[in-house]
Image (cartoon, helix red, strand yellow):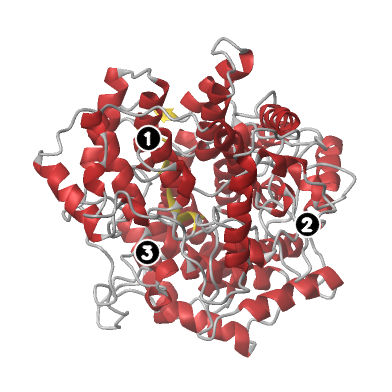
Amino acid sequence: MEPPSPSASFFPRATPSRRFTAPSADAIQAAITAAQDNLLRLQKPDGHWVGELFVDSTLCSDYVAFMHWRGKVDPARQEKCAAHIRRRQLPDGGWNIYEGGPSELNASVKAYFALKLAGDSPNDPWMIEARASILRRGGIPKTNTYSKLYLALLGQFPWKYLPAIPVECVMLPEWFYFNIYDMSSWTRAMVIPLAIINHFKPTRPVPDHLQLHELYPVGTEDADFSLPRAPRFLAWRNFFLRWDRLLKRIEALPWRPSRPHALRKALAWMTERMGEGSDGLAAIFPAMLNSLIALEAAGVPEDDPIYQKATRDFEGLFVHDPEDFRIQPCLSPVWDTSINMIALAESGVPSDHPALQRAADWLYSKEVRHLRGDWRHANPHPVASGWAFEYNNDYYPDTDDTMMVLMALRHVRPSDPAAAKASFGRALPWLLSFQCRDGGWAAFDRDVTKRWLEEMPFADHNAILDPTCSDLTARVLELLGYLGYSRELPLVRRAIGMLKDTQEDDGSWYGRWGVNYIYGTWQVLRGLRAIGLDMRADWIIRGRDWLESCQNDDGGWGETAASYDDPMLKGRGPSTASQTAWALMGLIACGDLNRRSIQRGMEFLVTTQEPDGSWTEPWTTGTGFPRVFYLKYDSYRNNWPLLALATWHNEKNRVFHPSQVGA
């Protein structure tokens, strides 16, 4: 049964009427022990953890379209994808992009096309419902640029209405007003393959009976689909649209002397980042899929080692569940391992426990020490030392994983103290070197914040930049606080200033990498506590009060991704284990464990725990690109609740976990 779609009236505000019994210390300890046992059972033999990343149906839809574009369809795999897509259709005929969300146009068009390619008839009842849902939302003309591009590859949208992405962009020097390193790392990894594809325009039309005429509103199939201009003549959007027209005229010229060199350079840039040390281009699904299309369009043979590696890496995202074939957007072993280590250590697992030491050794083995990473173009720090999200992604270590890894490693007594200290001595300065001009931290780069780029025609995935985030900035403060750094240091004071500047009027903070204001607010409060601020300050109390104001009647907290579209829905949603854990840790950071909100939240976690020590959580609480792409981390339902229970226990018993590794 599908969860109901969120709306302003669906989620009631918290009311104090429900009777509850605060859990005893013994009940909390029993819950901690069961949760520890559950995590330890899930550990891999080499010491790491990895949970599945669940996403919407678009990945399976794109894969079906890709098989047809290649002309090599695996019938069994296609049917598994089609079954996956059918299962996720909503009652109104469309498909959503997060659990409980409303139908979304791009996901729905992709799903319909994939099902039609897989053999479903347009006259099947579910296809009729899907078509009606799509047309109510404007049909193919209203989809975003990336959806239209995949349609163009199969002859279902005119290339002339897609933004030009010239491969010459890879040649622009770094001193130029714009170059590829002004875009976010994930956009860069998607755009370079798309530039190669844009050059070749490798259209392979599907047969007439598989085309999508019916997804164009009546009278629009041959209309002008040019992107609309901004009302103001001198707007950046209009500048880019005029520039796009010029680029298309240049592309139509018979002689383009720079094109062969630009193509070679773009292919070299792409294949270099797909080689050894990387599980595919940027190790994320969109870039990996685009790179496979680009390789084939460029004539790279299938028996070429880079093509074979790209295929293996791509298929490494597949989940061969007999009940439901799925595709993950990437893999999350470093992230999951770090959080699990912190939760276990904070909950009382000794620093020399074999499970923690195996996990620490695995993390040390994943340190990225290559100066070839893209980050170096905006950050001249002379030493490379960080961690990526995935198993192997040498070009794209990120700040958030590095923060979390260092917080995890500080808990474990190292088997080689000298090597561990050296690793800390490299990684911490590398992390701190990413502080941006406004005092905050972004995810992959430093100061990739040219707002005018958001008006580029292919920027409608809402993530062309990598701005600083309150959640990441607060996590740096949390780490520094645990390591004994003073709040009077200039870099700390600047970070605190950034958090003050980004606080919402109601006291909350926006969450960039988790859903949403609950995620941002708890991390800020936890970070401020760790760095030693007075948690009774008015601005901090406002954050605590906001968290309390959105507690549900069952004692838990929940928020859906709808709050990214409508801030009026912030902090509202069915209670989840992970978001309840976040809210509890934010409140505990402000002190006073006897507050009713904390006691009710603890009761929620204790009473909703499963007999095996896990929690059940169907909702989506992770964020990829706000308003575009979301993730459900399967590990979140198990590790964050344990950390919250441990945080309460440690606060009550005044337990402090000293660092086992010197920075």
Q: Nearer the viewer, residue 659 or 280?
A: 280
Foreground of the two, 213 or 98: 213
Q: Callout 3: few (<14), some (14-19), or many (20+) C-alpha neighbours within 10 Å?
A: many
Task: Tell me the residue at 63%/52% (across/down).
Answer: 246
Q: Amino acid at mark 1?
A: Gly
Q: Is residue 222 left or right of residue 256?
A: left
Contact check, label 2 and label 3, Cβ < 8 Å: no
Task: Give residue 195's position: percent from left, percent from top.
Answer: 61, 39
The reply to whether discs 3 and 1 touch (Cβ–Cβ < 8 Å) is no
In primary-sequence order, the first of circles 1 and 2 is: 1
Q: Is residue 383 above or below residue 271?
A: below
Tally of numbered tags:
3
Q: Label 2 amino acid?
A: Phe
CA distance separating discs 2 and 3: 30 Å
In the image, 197 versus 426, the foreground residue is 197
Residue 326 shows in the view = yes
Q: Mark 3 highlights which residue?
A: 560
Tag 3's secondary structure? Answer: loop
Give the number of the disc on residue 434: 2
**Which comes before the other along the chain, label 3 or label 1?**
1
Measured along the vertical axis of the image, is residue 378 above or below residue 580? above
Calculate the distance from the C-alpha at mark 3 to the C-alpha at mark 1.
36 Å
The amino acid type found where label 3 is placed reads Thr
